[in-house]
Amino acid sequence: MTLAAIEPAKPILFVEFRFLWIFAIIFGVNWLLRSNTARKVWLLVCSHVFYGCFFIGNPSEFFPNLFAGKWGDLPPGWWFPSLLWFSTIMDYYVGLGIEDAKTDRRRKQWVAASLLVNLGVLGFFKYYGFFDQNVRAVVAWLGLTPSWEPLKVFLPYGISFYTFQSLSYSLEVYRKKLPAERSFLNLAFFIAFFPQVVAGPIVRAMTFLPQTLKKVEWSSVDVRGCLALFLIGFVKKACIGDTLSQVSDPYFASPETHSAYSAWAASLAYAGQIYCDFSGYSDMAIAVSRLLGYELCVNFAFPYFSNSITEFWRRWHMSLSSWLRDYLYISLGGNRGSKLFTYRNLMLTMVLGGLWHGAAWTYVVWGAMHGFALIVHREWARMTAAAAGIGKVMNVIAVPLTFFWVLLTWIPFRANDIYTDKPNATDKGAKLLSRSSAGFQSLDKDDSEKPMAYPFAKTDDKKTVALLAHDAKTNTWTGTGADGKPATIHLHQSGFALTAKVWESLVFFKDHAKRNVCGNFIWVILGGLTIVHWLNSRGLLAKWWRVIPDWLFSLLLGGGWALALHWKVVAYKQFIYFQF
């Protein structure tokens, strides 16, 4: 039995050639327009078209089916772009309502409405399946049989990012840090700006909206810096990150069949992969934005060289960590209370930050581990504040110790439940699949580039399969297979079981089997990347290319692109943070 997949629209990736020609059109028209308002209108339209293409697929197929009323032939989630408009319109009026309110009570009502609606929409699409599955498990544990049918829901691209971005505007207006934006165009442009709408950085209204008020001249654009940054981001994602995934993905599909050597190689590869993947996207988003005359916030600052977990969160995904600090941690009370009160707030912030990343208990564990580490670091800093000798000793091991803890936390972050289409995964022809909040993804090497099968999605007469029914007692999903017959996939290994196996290998060097996922070349790659990364963190590679002549820079840039295109993997993978 083969589990076929319903094919959603394919997102537009910054590393694809089709993005380059699309951006060339956006870029050219933007700078040909002389009016600042005209530029913003153009970029707003382009942003919504760009975001819409993530859901509608081929316009030449989508619009004829839409106008003909062939709803069953439309891609799943084709209407999701309307959610972006809904969030924008709502927060526009919320901002005006907050500023025009005559009483504090009225202001609180307006901001509460923004929180309720924004977080409600996010919670429904992101956590409905998680909530439904856990409620079914509790009902089954009580000896009852869940009888309700699950809704057909799956996660829209970018909803976690643009929801937090839109919320930042309402909260800043409520806190009187920002006046309400009277121009709907400016606010809509800020929320939908295409370089960051799908995967960040999470830009603050107070830093972006002022940029919309003045016209930027081409002469003020750092073209050399933008081109270099985009190439760096491309190399990080398409060359390094996607290459490292060829080590990490096979291992995490079946850690029980690999050695401790493989566990270390794959875990380090994943640490490099997720950093290069996400920071590569951020680099390209920042470069594209700057080429259009707008500045986005920096999102990474060499986080793996942090000497504490506190410093790590000042350097990793900085736009999210600062958002959680300013709008969640401080709103909970921050450190304005007893030690226990402060540590409760830290733990709640990190656990909710974990849930923000994904609707699974493994993400909760990931967040809790970081919360625990933040508390331990605070206590350690307090106890050793007067002991200079201990501090000097710890400075020697602080960076590797912090990195090792971060490495351990990446395991539950990466460890999805593993399912199979046969009760015994060792059966010939069995297919292994991982399940996240988005759906089921084949883990078989030959099927690695096939589209996902969404458990809460429509199907048509050509493509299956809607795996709609979940049995909480047996933890199986059932639906209709490609051959029209009932299809069932079974839990092969939970994310927690997978995490435990990997931790055994990392901490106790336990071999679950003798199979190695890769050769010694991985250490050369990781070692070389570490050296280059360290040199760049010291600024030793940051400025030389700025002072060379234009002809030499152009020659090196062309050579860099030639090497990058030769090095990249054959098939591009989606950015990891697209699933959040």
Image (cartoon, rainbow, N blue to C red):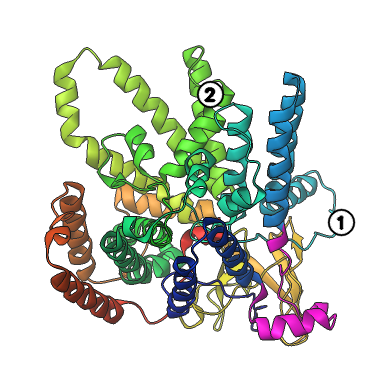
Q: Is residue 120 visible?
A: no
CA neighbours of label 1 inside 10 A, class few (<14), some (14 to 19), many (20+): few
Q: Where does the magenta region start and end?
A: 56-82
Disc 2 is placed on an element classified as helix
Q: Residue at x 42, y 54 (%)?
A: 216
Above or below, 284 relative to 385: below
Locate the N terminus and report the quarter of the image it occupies.
bottom right
**Viewer-proximal residue among 207 and 19:** 207
Q: Nearer the viewer, mark 2 or mark 1?
A: 2
Q: Residue at x 49, y 28 (%)?
A: 346
- Establish if 26 lies above or below 570: above
Label 2 amino acid? Answer: Arg
Report helix, strand or loop for mark 1: loop
- On the image, the x and y values in percent for residue 347 come to 51, 30
Q: Position of residue 345 (x, y in %)?
A: 53, 25
The one nearer the camera, 554 or 579, is 554
Tag shown at residue 460: none
Residue 148, disc: 1
For the point 39% across and 48% down, the residue is 299
The residue carrying mark 2 is: 344
For the C terminus, the image quarter is bottom right
Please provide percent x and percent y for residue 454. Answer: 67, 69
How many numbered markers are drawn? 2
Residue 478 magenta-highlighted = no
Q: Mark 2 and 1 residues: CB-CB less than 8 Å, in contact? A: no
Q: Is residue 316 visible?
A: yes
Q: Of the two numbered discs 2 and 1 on the same chain, state the one appearing first in sequence.
A: 1
Q: Residue furthest right?
A: 147
- Residue name at image x 18 percent, y 54 percent: 542
Q: Quadrant location of residue 276? A: bottom left
- Amino acid marked by disc 1: Trp
